[in-house]
Image (cartoon, rainbow, N blue to C red):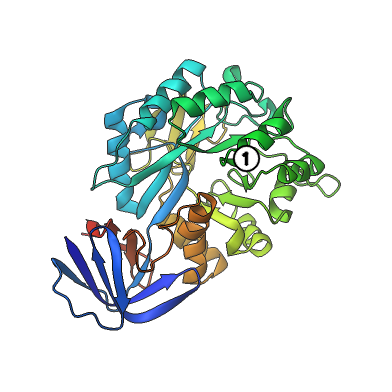
Amino acid sequence: MSLLIRNITVVNAVGREEQMDVWMKNGKIAQIAPYIDVHATEQLDGAGKFLLPGFIDMHIHGSAQMDAMDASDEGLHVMAKSLLKEGTTSFLATTMTQSYENIERAIANIAQFQSQPDEAELLGIHVEGPFVSKKRAGAQPLDYIVQPDLELFTKWQALSGFKIKQITLAPEEPNGFKAVQKIAASGVIVSIGHADATFEQMKKAVQLGATQGTHLYNQMRPFHHRDPGVVGGVLLLDAIKAELIVDFIHAHQGAVEMAYRLKGADGLILITDAMRAKGMPYGDYDLGGQMVHVTEAGAHLSNGALAGSILKMDQAVRNMQQVTHCTLEELVKMSSFNAAQQLKLREKGQLVQGYDADAVIMDQQLLLQHTIKAGQIMYSLK
């Protein structure tokens, strides 16, 4: 199988090349040049459109009625297939605070999952909770929040077949700093979230290896001019990349613009933090055993707490550009390149020869036209 895209603008984090031909073969990018003389199985005219690397969502719980915590193989397949419709070609299945038994069932299920050709690739697991702060629980069930436990994490990592790639925790909790140091040293991304740490504790966590902040602004000790807190730490510490949910519900447009000005495109990672209601009608949905009310105002628990989103990645990209007027190259950084760098993915996040042929084609208004997974068109706008 091979695909030849003619006369398209190829956009990477470092620049763009206009009126290029792109040849994809056997799941990889075989060649990018002004003109390619090959006979491909399929050809596409890309005139007036942009080719960007496929989106990578590092923080997503569910979609299309399914959730990673369901511990359902079929559910993960439905979810993975649905993500191609928004341009997401790779993702981390994200768990949440629950009983040990439920978390372990979810981890074991994700560990054995094999993505199919017509699905987004599951890159691994993001464990969100239970090692978080009860003061900043949000939609994480209070009854199951526990102190950071290295022995427990080691057990879960073995159960996952070493597929846990990211963990969200609160470093200020007892044993938190030791957990940051040991887990980061093992190669797992330590992301600070659902945390009540001070600015000084944030600096210490970074020194010990923390490199990310989970959904900036949400369920973090807020910024105060005498106590910059977790928000101040994420915004000011260069070692931290900040996840950002750009649905204008989790963060005001002004807060999104402030994050962009302070962190720059190099420091931001667009995520959805989506739950099972994504792509579904408004109504009531389950999240970790809690009822979530989904309306045009977002997904909320009955107490009013935000409970994930129904955001799609292509909309996040458009929203980001609308507020910041950032370049397409910067959008590539925030939607794929930075995530690939954090996850140490050597063949994703860039459109260059030899890399995975995962890409999206967008028009001048950044509307998604096609999603390409492993060199095959898996979604087209009707």
Q: Residue drawn at (60%, 31%), measured in percent from left and top?
A: 138
Which residue is pictured at 25% across the width and 43% down the height? 116
Residue 289 can be seen in this image: no
Disc 1 on helix, strand or loop? helix
Which residue was labeled with disc 1?
184
Who's the residue at 51% across and 21% down the image? 98
Relative to 41, say whether 179 is above or below: above
Instruction: Point out residue 345 in the picture as x, y percentages from the top left corner.
Output: 46, 53
Q: How many marks?
A: 1
Left or right position of 29 against 297: left
Q: Looking at the picture, how far across and down is residue 233, in whole percent?
A: 73, 48
Q: Establish if 45 lies above or below 136.
A: below
Residue lying at 65% horizontally and 60% vertically, measured from the top left: 263
Asked if one can make out residue 244 in the rendered structure from this viewpoint, the answer is yes
- Report which quarter residue 81 is drawn in: top left
Q: Classify the position of the C terminus by image quarter.
A: bottom left
Please tell me which residue lies in front, 146 or 149: 149
Crowding at dot 1, Cα within 10 Å, few <14 / some 14-19 / many 20+, comes out as some
Q: Position of residue 328 (x, y in %)?
A: 47, 70
Q: Closer to the camera, 9 or 33?
A: 33
Instruction: Say whether residue 53 is left or right of residue 41.
Output: right
Single out the residue that lies furthest toward the right. Answer: 226
Q: Amino acid at mark 1?
A: Ala
Residue 67 position, x and y percent, is 38, 32
Image quarter (top left, top right, bottom left or bottom right) of the N terminus: bottom left
Among the 4 quarters of the image, the one containing residue 104: top left
In the figure, is residue 41 to the left or right of 172?
left
